[in-house]
Image: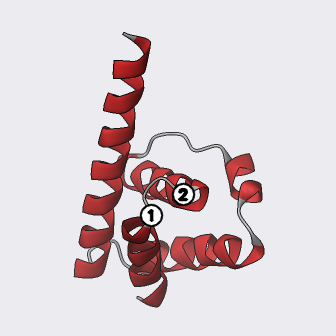
C-alpha cells in the first residue's frame, strides 16, 4: 500500500499544492462514487501521474486497508476546507 501512503504524505505536506488538490479530489471521488475529471490527471507531473495510477491500482485491490482510511480522512478534510474557503470568498 505504498501509493496510498505516498499520496497521504504528499497531501499532508502541502494541501494547497496543485497535485495535492487533484489527488485528494481523486480519493474522495473513488470513495464516494462521485465523478472525477480524468483530464485533471494530465495536469500532474509525470511522477505524480504515476502515483495516481498506482493509487488507482491499490484502491482496486482492497478497499479496506487502514492506510486507505487515513488517506481518505486527510483528503475529505482538505476538500471540506477548500470548499469552506471558496464559499467564504464568494459570500
Q: Is residue 64 above or below residue 18?
A: below
Please tell me in which quadrant of the rendered image residue 90 appears.
top left
Q: Is residue 33 above or below residue 2?
A: above
Instruction: Look at mark 1 in the image and give the residue it sits on.
Output: 14
Label 1: which secondary element: loop
Rounded to the nearest angstrom, the CA distance separating label 2 from label 1 is 6 Å
Q: Is residue 18 above or below residue 89?
A: below
Residue toward you, 49 or 83: 83
Bin the neighbour count of mark 1 within 10 Å (Cα to Cα): few under 14, some 14-19, many 20 and up. Answer: few
How far across and down, in percent of the image, does residue 22 sit?
Answer: 56, 54
Count of numbered tags? 2
The quarter of the rendered structure image containing the N terminus is: bottom left
The residue sitting at the top extreme is: 91
Q: For the residues labelled 2 and 1, say whether their Cβ atoms are less than 8 Å apart.
A: yes
Q: Is residue 27 left or right of residue 72?
A: right
The quarter of the rendered structure image containing the C terminus is: top left
Instruction: Look at mark 2 in the image and give the residue it sits on.
Output: 17
Please tell me in which quadrant of the rendered image residue 17 appears.
bottom right
Q: Residue at 32% of width from left, 73% of height from top?
A: 68
Q: Residue at 69% of width from left, 79% of height from top?
A: 47
Label 2: which secondary element: loop
Q: Is residue 9 left or right of residue 64?
A: right
How far across and down, in percent of the image, does residue 16 sit?
Answer: 48, 52
How far across and down, in percent of the image, does residue 23 sit?
Answer: 52, 60
Amino acid at each position: 500500500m505504498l501509493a496510498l501512503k505516498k499520496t497521504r504524505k504528499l497531501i499532508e505536506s502541502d494541501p494547497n499544492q496543485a497535485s495535492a488538490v487533484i489527488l485528494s479530489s481523486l480519493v474522495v471521488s473513488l470513495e464516494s462514487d462521485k465523478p472525477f475529471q480524468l483530464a485533471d490527471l494530465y495536469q500532474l507531473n509525470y511522477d505524480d501521474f504515476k502515483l495516481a495510477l498506482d493509487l488507482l491500482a491499490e484502491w482496486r485491490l482492497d478497499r479496506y486497508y487502514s492506510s486507505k482510511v487515513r488517506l481518505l480522512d486527510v483528503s475529505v478534510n482538505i476538500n471540506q476546507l477548500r470548499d469552506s474557503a471558496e464559499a467564504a470568498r464568494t459570500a
